[in-house]
Amino acid sequence: MKVLAFESSCDETSVALVDGPRVLANVVASQIAIHQEYGGVVPEIATRQHLKNLQPVLASVFAETGLTPAEVEAVAATRGPGLPPALMIGFRAAQGFAYARRLPFLGLHHHEAHLYSSWTHGSPPESAFEEIKPSVSLIVSGGHTLLVHLQGPLNHRTLGGTIDDAAGECFDKVAKLIGLPYPGGPEVDRLAAEGDPEAYAFPRPLLKEKTDDFSFSGLKTSVRYFLEKNPSVLEQGQAIRDLCASVQAAIIEVLVTKTLRAAERLRVHSVTGSGGVVCNRGLRQSLTLACQERGIQLRLTDPQLCTDNAGMVGLLAQLHYARGDRPMVQDDDVLSTWSLDGSSG
Ligand code: KG4
Ligand code: ZN
């Protein structure tokens, strides 16, 4: 089924055309350069940029695939969670497209789209769905850190989440303290590759506790105190690389240990990782090693589908339409908060 999918929950305007497991086109207009000036996403600016970017992004999808709007069979859009004015741009455009062409429309959960993006293999467009197996799934992005027990297709239950900052937010805030541009995650990743992860000791919040919840704001605060006491670190290139490697090691140890602990407790033989932070090379490597040691199968989302994009929304739509989910009515609205557990009905 050829699904036209829209994503505009934060600062990426994206439209994709997905046919079964194949992502035929996945165009993303990033607003990073605009928000960099402010050190973070400004909702009103993000919304105006979505309005400006949507039409050219949509046109690129049809130009890239050579398909025409008349060939689209169904429509989907991110319904939430996210910034409501930003969500509304992609969601309303999708509803309008579906209404004008009398096509079925589904509003989908952003984290559910991240979650199931791990179950295709091969890089787009030559991807294929894997058989979805019981697993523990780590979803790590700028806004959320979630640990989920996946029991089967569209059957999942949240085990834990962050009680304060998300892992990506921690990367971004630490990067800001160091003076690196927004978003800081990729910058920290790049510098950490040449640093010593044992140079400085930072806390591993909630690592020892049995809970599946996460907390990262204390780690960010301890980096701030560290820099107040040791300002000269910011004057030396190698010391900055060591600092990035040490902070990244703390975040990774917490994420990997808790994910594997949950997998062992729930006796699943499969672990997945998705969301923007799963682009992190150190995290991918640590998860790979930890899963190999325990004989657990690991499915990491392809980096092209990790950060926000409509391709993952189109893939998720395939699962919903295959299950026979009823399309939405036209007056359904976006949701700024939405529990992942209530998203699949
Ligand atoms: O999934 P995503 O694109 O947006 C949200 O739904 O939030 O994730 C964005 C987050 C940002 O915090 C960004 O710094 C982080 O993902 N990120 C990374 C890397 N690439 C993106 N964090 C660490 N290492 C990376 N390579
Ligand atoms: Zn996301």
Image (cartoon, helix red, strand yellow):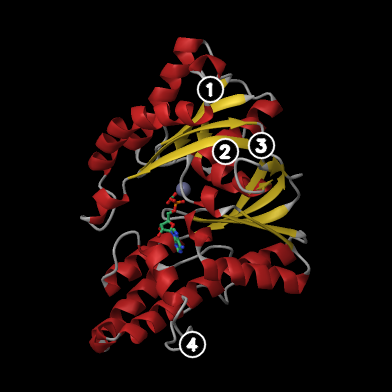
Q: Which of marks 4 and 1 is in front?
A: 1
For disc 4, the marked residue is 198
Q: Which of marks 2 and 4 is in front?
A: 4
* Disc nearer the start of the sequence (3/4): 3
- Classify mark 2: helix, strand or loop: helix
For disc 3, the marked residue is 21
Q: Nearer the viewer, mark 2 or mark 3?
A: 3
- Classify mark 3: helix, strand or loop: loop
Can you give x and y, in whole percent of width and height, for residue 287 in the image? 63, 68
* Disc nearer the start of the sequence (2/4): 4
Q: In this view, does 6 lie above or below 251?
A: above
The disc placed on residue 342 is 2
| 163 or 32, nearer to the observer | 32
Mark 4–mark 1 distance (CA, rounded to whole Å): 52 Å
Q: Residue at x 31, y 46 (%)?
A: 31
Mark 2–mark 3 distance (CA, rounded to whole Å): 25 Å
- Classify mark 4: helix, strand or loop: loop
**Contact flag, marks 2 and 3 (Cβ < 8 Å):** no
Can you give x and y, in whole percent of width and height, for residue 171 in the image? 40, 66
Mark 3–mark 4 distance (CA, rounded to whole Å): 42 Å
> Residue reaching furthest left?
37
The disc placed on residue 67 is 1
Mark 3 closeness class: few <14, some 14–19, many ≥20 residues within 10 Å: many
Looking at the rendered image, the quarter that the N terminus falls into is: top right
* Residue 330 makes an appearance in the image: no
Q: Nearer the viewer, mark 1 or mark 2?
A: 1
